[in-house]
Image: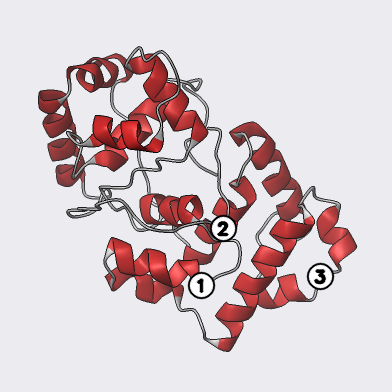
Amino acid sequence: MTVRSKKDDLKPYRSQSVGSLDDRKVWQKGVRYLKKRDPVLARIISSIGPIRFELDTDHYEAIVGSIIYQQLAGSAARAILNRFKQLYEGKLPSPKEYLSTDVARLRSSGLSPQKISYIKDLAERLLDGRLDLKRLDGLSDDEAMRELDAVRGIGRWTAEMFLLFKLGRTDVLPVDDLGLRKAAKNAYRLRKLPSRKRFEELAVKWHPYSSISTLYLWRTTEKPETPAKW
């Protein structure tokens, strides 16, 4: 997936998450709801078939992965993430390990100076207690996004990826994601890429299951074997 993220407005759209995507009953209910409400999505869902969705197991890894994926195509981001992990024997470093790593070594993995600074700020906040990622589990979508907004470099898209892939929120709609907008343009036969306003108009019928719509639209532009996340 091609993504766009920058430190801009983190104002969420009308998030109405209900339950968790990790609950198969919630997922199946959402699929039935979308197929009934949107004929275009109904065709896409029937064509692609079931999507195997699993939550990320680690809060910290989910955030670091999202930061690395910012503004990159999925294949390029995965390559950088793999090289980054190779610096630490195939695993993500702990915040303490990361802060003790020489910047030149981090740069050798392909990380940009900006992203190095973003992960540094995240690591520092986790170590000194300013940020408690596990506490986000009990917050509303809007509250969780505001907490993440305090971290340098975490914009709307990065926060949305955390809500989707780690917290399993059902109503995540990354309106600024270029790959998603391209998928919507093709699926709905639009003459041009939908603006944020136009995209939100398309999505009115998806709430409170926009996350499922998002995952299926992404899949229309990817190869079946391509991971939906890192």
> Which image quarter: residue 186?
top left
Q: Is residue 149 left or right of residue 31?
A: right
Residue 86: x %, y % from top left: 76, 52
As displayed, is residue 142 above or below residue 1? Answer: below
Q: Which residue is mark 1?
A: 150
* C-alpha gap between disc 2 and disc 3: 25 Å
Q: Amino acid at mark 3?
A: Thr
Callout 1–callout 3 Cβ contact below 8 Å? no
Residue drawn at point x = 25 percent, y = 33 percent: 201
Q: Which residue is mark 2?
A: 7
Q: Amino acid at mark 1?
A: Ala
Mark 1 or mark 3: name the one nearer the start of the chain: 3
Q: Nearer the viewer, mark 2 or mark 3?
A: 2
* C-alpha gap between disc 1 and disc 3: 24 Å
Label 1 residue SS: loop
Say whether residue 93 is visible.
no
Label 3 residue SS: loop
Q: Amino acid at mark 2?
A: Lys
Q: Which residue is mark 3?
A: 101
Mark 1 neighbour class, 10 Å CA radius: few under 14, some 14 to 19, many 20 or more? some
